[in-house]
């Protein structure tokens, strides 16, 4: 087993997909051990550390990478299996921002009422108990919630030498913020440039669907990813697979278009996998599918279309990459 560990320095962190040289070259079949910083770069450590004071735009939402995958070429698909995602600290943070989030005026949705206050909430993270503790700022109310680690941001370099800020989700991946991207899931990303140049970041201890206030329970993570390359198979939008479901994503504004992209991809993918007529696949997805929300606050919104594999006869996708990578991840965990 080829295991590579990478812990970035502050200078190594990237804030775009594309536009940066690789921090390392890896071969398909590699198991990658990563540290990822939280979306504030670890600078928000208490209620008085307002992001507007301790962070500098555009240096938000850092990602670890990019990694050059040997042999990856445009037209291929990169498969990344998340073996484990574990909080690196015993605390995490969430915030509200002026002009950011789903329930406030923004620079594109101009309103006359005052902007929301900038407020920081600190969360206690208990990995052994698998909980995070919410504490209200203006009362004694508190509650424990299940720890459900995920990565909000994963992607490859866009095509045509483009560089995109890490906060923007699109066809290359990016800041999709879907809670479906947890350990045990494989994400498929279409390769746009030689080497793919993938990066990962924006760990969340948990997040409600939509990331409504604009931030999740933001945390640094120790993450293990198994990497594979599927040659000659394209992927138009990021797709996800777990043991029981296939998922398609779409990112756009307005939210209806993000929804349509994800549903269109799942319908056409289902038709291709089963040989169904496209309208028959449309009917099947309409009655058997789910539509988890990714984010409704970023520069683009993200929707997910999700369908049980059982409804499709459990087809093999991407040459059974998920099953192989899952087995590789299990071998890695048993050796530790």
Image: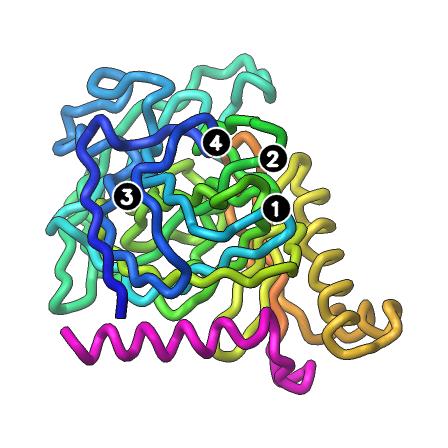
Instruction: Identify the residue shown where x is 54% and y is 30%.
Output: 299
How crowded pointer 1 is (Cα within 10 Å; few <14, some 14-19, many 20+) is rated as: some
Q: In front: mark 3 or mark 4? A: 4
Instruction: Identify the residue shown where x is 53% and y is 39%.
Output: 169
Which is more toward the observer, 177 or 25?
25
299 part of magenta stretch:
no
Q: Which residue is mark 3?
A: 218
Q: Are marks 4 and 2 in contact (CB under 8 Å)?
A: no
State the predominant SS element of the stretch in magenta.
Answer: helix
Instruction: Identify the residue shown where x is 49% and y is 47%.
Output: 210
Which is more toward the observer, 220 or 1?
1
Tell me how far mark 1 sits from mark 2, CA to CA: 9 Å
Q: Earlier in the sequence, mark 3 or mark 1?
A: 1
Numbered circles on residues, count: 4
* Residue 121 position within the rendered picture, expressed as x and y whole percent measured from the top left: 22, 38
Which is more toward the observer, 238 or 263?
238
Which residues fall within the magenta stretch? 308-336
**Is residue 148 visible to us here?**
no
Classify the position of the N terminus by image quarter.
Answer: bottom left
Q: Earlier in the sequence, mark 4 or mark 1?
A: 4
Helix, strand or loop for disc 2: loop
Q: Earlier in the sequence, mark 3 or mark 4?
A: 4
Q: Earlier in the sequence, mark 2 or mark 3?
A: 2
Q: Which residue is mark 2?
A: 159
Q: In front: mark 1 or mark 2? A: 1
Q: Earlier in the sequence, mark 4 or mark 2?
A: 4
Q: Which residue is mark 4?
A: 18
Tell me how far mark 4 sits from mark 1, CA to CA: 14 Å
Above or below for 76 versus 333? above
317 part of magenta stretch:
yes
Q: Are marks 1 and 2 in contact (CB under 8 Å)?
A: yes
Which is more toward the observer, 44 or 13?
13
């Amino acid at each position: 087993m080829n295991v590579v560990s990478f812990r970035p320095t502050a200078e190594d962190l990237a804030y775009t997909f594309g536009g940066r040289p690789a921090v390392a070259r890896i071969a398909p079949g590699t198991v990658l051990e990563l540290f990822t910083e939280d979306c504030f770069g670890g600078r928000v450590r208490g209620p008085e550390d307002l992001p507007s004071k301790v962070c500098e735009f555009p240096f938000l939402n850092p990602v670890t990478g990019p990694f050059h995958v040997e042999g990856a070429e445009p037209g291929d698909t990169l498969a990344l299996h998340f073996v484990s995602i574990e909080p690196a600290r015993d605390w995490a943070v969430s915030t509200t921002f002026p002009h950011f989030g789903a329930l406030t005026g923004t620079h594109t949705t101009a309103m006359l009422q005052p902007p929301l206050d900038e407020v920081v909430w600190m969360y206690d993270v208990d990995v052994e108990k698998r909980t995070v503790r919410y504490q209200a700022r203006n009362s004694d109310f508190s509650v424990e919630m299940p720890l459900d680690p995920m990565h909000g941001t994963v992607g490859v370099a866009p095509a045509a030498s483009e560089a995109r800020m890490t906060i923007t989700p699109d066809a290359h991946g990016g800041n999709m913020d879907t809670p479906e991207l947890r350990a045990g899931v494989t994400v498929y990303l279409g390769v746009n440039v030689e080497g793919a140049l993938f990066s990962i970041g924006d760990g969340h201890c948990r997040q409600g669907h939509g990331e409504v206030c604009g931030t999740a329970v933001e945390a640094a993570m120790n993450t293990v990813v198994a990497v594979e390359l599927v040659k000659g198979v394209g992927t138009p939008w990021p797709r996800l697979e777990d043991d029981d479901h296939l998922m398609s994503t779409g990112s756009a504004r307005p939210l209806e278009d993000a929804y349509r992209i994800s549903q269109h991809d799942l319908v056409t993918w289902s038709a291709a996998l089963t040989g169904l007529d496209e309208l028959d696949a449309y009917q099947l997805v309409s009655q058997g599918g789910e539509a988890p929300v990714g984010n409704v606050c970023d520069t683009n919104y993200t929707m997910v279309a999700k369908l049980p594999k059982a409804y499709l006869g459990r087809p093999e996708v991407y040459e059974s990459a998920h099953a192989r990578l899952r087995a590789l991840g299990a071998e890695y965990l048993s050796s530790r």
